Image: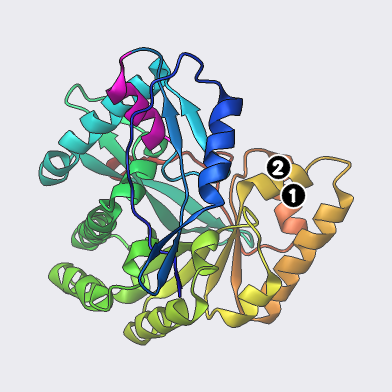
Amino acid sequence: MTQQTCFTCCCWIQTRNPSKKRLAVIIEQIRASSLEYGEFSYDLSLYAGVAIGEEREKALLAMQSIEHTYHTDIAFYNHDMHNAVRKKNSIESQMYPALQNKEFKLFLQPKFGMKNEGLVGAEALVRWQNPDGSYRYPNEFIPLFEENGFCLKLDLYMVERACEQIKAWKDAGLTPVPISVNYSKMLFSDLNYPDNLMQILNRYHVSPSLITLEILEGVATDNLELLNHQIEALHALGFRISMDDFGNGYSSLNMLYQLNIDELKLDRGFLRQVSKEDEERRYIILEQIVSFARKLGIATVAEGIETQEDEALIQALKCNFGQGYFYDKPMSAKEFS
């Protein structure tokens, strides 16, 4: 019986010639072998981290840099790896205190209707405020949070901040607009997630109809059955579900048929490519996506609207909503109000 169990074994090899070619030969020789233990046979895989001189920690650091990558077997230590680890350790040492101190701030980017409806909603975006008042942007910490699981706590925290803002609007006599918040991949398997959401909403007396949960297109391809089960539970409570960044990966129109979502957000990169004169075929594809979604009763949102030409394009495509710097940049909740 062949097992695919994964484990790590570190060894130290000293050589005067740590060439990539030589290491590749060693790796292939090991991969051609297997480990026998009783009735079980284990396939072996090897990754190599290389550092020059008596630098075992640096070699280990180089190996760890390719731990979660594909098609990469060998990494040579360089100074950038050292800086990356220092940055990672710094962020991880600060993330829990930052959550407790509410250093993660709610920013909102307006969403507008394409039939002169004006402001119809907003997307919640996170910014990490430093003690000096400056901000760290999501690309600086979100990938790490997705890797270490901290995004589970951050997502629920952002739902609470969104509910807090909706309550503030209501208390001020203003009509609240729906807010879209992120729905992380790791939350799919959490059967308590719908209940946890409702506890937050009930605390602030917010209707689920004012919260849209956004899933990424890439996440939806992992386990459609599990995702649909979670979507059904959330729909039953009154939440709306949006698929973000559609067109960024290996999108399939069949996915739209299989998933019971309410809204489809077209990736901004798709729009940038369509705007080029030589992208007529891509325009036709995008036109069909919007048409297909409309027939399924799924609203469409075009992201990354930056120019009047972009707006004219999405109006021609008959998208329902638009979002981007042409209308307004992401802003603090105070500025939005």
Residue 239, percent from left and from top: 37, 76
SS at circle 1? helix
Residue at which label 1 appears: 312
Mark identifier at residue 272: 2
Residue ID at (43%, 18%):
78
Q: Nearer the viewer, residue 47 or 119?
A: 47
Q: Is residue 58 above or below residue 233?
A: above
Q: Quadrant of residue 3?
A: bottom left
Residue 29, percent from left and from top: 56, 43
Q: Earlier in the sequence, mark 2 or mark 1?
A: 2
Residue type at tag 2: Arg
Q: Quadrant of residue 72?
A: top right
Q: Nearer the viewer, residue 153 or 36?
A: 36
Q: Nearer the viewer, residue 267 or 17?
A: 17
Residue ID at (44%, 19%):
15
Residue ID at (32%, 31%):
136
Specify few, some or many for label 1: CA neighbours under 10 Å numbering under 14, 14-19, or 20 or more: few
Bounds of the magenta segment: 54-65
- C-alpha span from label 2 to label 1: 13 Å
Relative to 7, 169 lies left or right: left
Q: Quadrant of residue 206?
A: bottom left
